[in-house]
Amino acid sequence: MHNLRVSPSSDLVIGSRTPMASTTSTKMLTRNIYTDGTYLDKNPLWHTDESPFKVKQILRMMKKHDLKPATICEVGCGAGEVLGLLQQKMDNACRFCGYDISPQAIEMCRSRSNEKLQFKLADIGREENAFFDLIFVLDVFEHVQDYFGFLNAIRAKSDLKIFHIPLDLSVQAVLRKGGLLKRRELWGHLHYFTKETALETLKDVGYQVLDYSYTPRGIELAKETVHKLALLPRMLGFWIDPDLAVRTLGGYGLLVLAR
């Protein structure tokens, strides 16, 4: 069992309207689609439909390593649905806090907030006294221009992190003209990873990778016809050789537990 430290200095404030500075950990390209409303226009659900899938993956990793944190933070919490669902499945004493730089996302969080689940419009990298037992970074750093700076800025904010990283780079995605452009234009992905480059990125910043596993997002979340047609090849290929199937056919993410 991990002995998780609880910091009394973690300041949980609902919807703080702290002015956002242009720091290395949050600085995007000249136009910030997460603060000007563009991202919400393109993704009105803010991916809340994927939250049950993410929660299932997180709980599996936590159970495997017997993690029983007293404080949990999600960096880039979006609409807050992951934390809301997770709160329903964990000990009532656990406290949750979500950080996001998007005022539109934080506004969507308000209906989910309660005494032990709170949200901040802020860059956690600039929060001097913020410390949590466990931090989630779910589908986030591929959006950040300086993702090395971002990963370095959150290192001291918790002992343990759980990352979920979309593995956008695959043979089929590269071969299709719009394979990667869709991820850039609709979802704002600026960087694209394979399992190997994702893990090496974390190690380069100084993280110790404790465990990782593939997540079948393209299997369980398939909606479009083209994705449904790819179900059987992806599932069969994954059964034969997981690494080769993910590199060639895509459709999977990577869940990483790191210190």
Image (cartoon, rainbow, N blue to C red):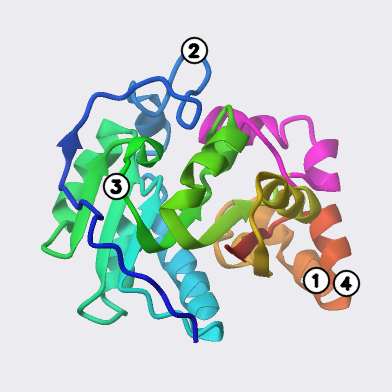
> Closer to the N terminus: mark 1 or mark 3?
3
Label 3 secondary element: loop
Badge 1 density bin: few <14, some 14–19, many ≥20, Cα 10 Å:
some
Label 2 secondary element: loop
Q: Which residue is mark 4?
A: 241
Residue 189 belongs to the span the image colors magenta = yes
Q: Which residue is mark 1?
A: 238
Q: Nearer the viewer, mark 3 or mark 4?
A: 3
- State whether residue 257 is above or below residue 247: below
Q: Would you say the residues marked 4 and 2 are in contact, meaning their CB atoms lie under 8 Å apart? A: no
Whether residue 208 appears in this view of the structure is: yes
> Closer to the N terminus: mark 2 or mark 3?
2
What kind of residue is marked 3?
Asn
- State whether residue 256 is above or below residue 39: below
CA gap, disc 2 to disc 3?
A: 30 Å
Q: Would you say the residues marked 4 and 1 are in contact, meaning their CB atoms lie under 8 Å apart? A: yes
Label 1 secondary element: helix
What residue span does the magenta drawing correspond to?
Answer: 169-193
Badge 3 density bin: few <14, some 14–19, many ≥20, Cα 10 Å:
few
Q: Position of residue 115 (x, y in %)?
A: 11, 63
Q: Which residue is mark 3?
A: 129
Q: Would you say the residues marked 2 and 1 are in contact, meaning their CB atoms lie under 8 Å apart? A: no
